[in-house]
Image (cartoon, rainbow, N blue to C red):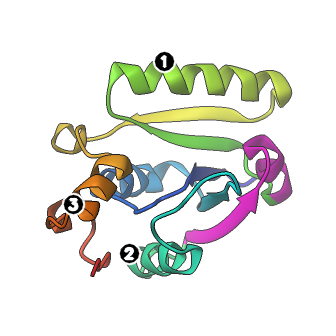
Amino acid sequence: MNRIALFPGSFDPITKGHENVIRRALPLFDEIVIGIGLNTQKQYMFSLEKRTEWIESIFAKEEMIRVETYEGLTVDFCKKINANYILRGLRTENDFEFEKNIAQMNHTMEPKIESIFIICDPKYSAITSTIVRDIIKNGSDASQFVPEEVIIQ
């Protein structure tokens, strides 16, 4: 059985914290699917195409990473792609509490899928996509918080 992990998120935009967690998780899995979740109720700052392009560019040299989009429940998408694990990054204790509840619900719905948490490097703990979007909306430079492939104009 392959160890396939899904790293779900909206990645609006992807941050250095996301990249850090994914790169540190590479030795743990045979494949990591970066799943860009689609929520029709949510207003995104960046198009799905742009977010996908950025992620594919960041991980272009990593053969064991692929990028897919999905709608609906994350556990259902895991079953569709044969993922045994849901990979999540933690920055703070608030992240842990939030992610713990989701992980417990996912495990109740699908006991064969385990959630794996990786704590991001401390230097990335304050970076969130929400804060990055706010910086951009207010006309400031967010380049220090996103991978160099993420070019925001």
Q: Secondary structure at mark 2?
A: helix
Residue 7 position, x and y percent, is 56, 51
Q: Secondary structure at mark 3?
A: loop
> Residue under circle 3?
138
Residue 51 position, x and y percent, is 49, 72
Quote the CA–CA distance across marks 1 and 3.
30 Å
Front position in the image: 144 or 139: 139
Quote the CA–CA distance across marks 2 and 1.
29 Å
Disc number for residue 97: 1
Q: Decide: is 148 above or below 101.
A: below
| Quadrant, the C terminus | bottom left
User: What residue type is disc 1 on?
Assistant: Glu
Q: Which residue lies most toward the front here?
A: 138
Residue 108 in the figure: left or right of residue 85: right
> Residue under circle 2?
58
- 1 or 3: mark nearer the eye: 3
Residue 10 position, x and y percent, is 54, 56
- The local crowd at label 2, few if under 14, some if 14 to 19, many if 20 or more residues have their Cα within 10 Å, is some
Residue at 29% x, 80% y: name it: 151
Range covered by the magenta-colored residues: 64-80
Residue at 46% x, 56% y: name it: 26
Disc number for residue 63: none
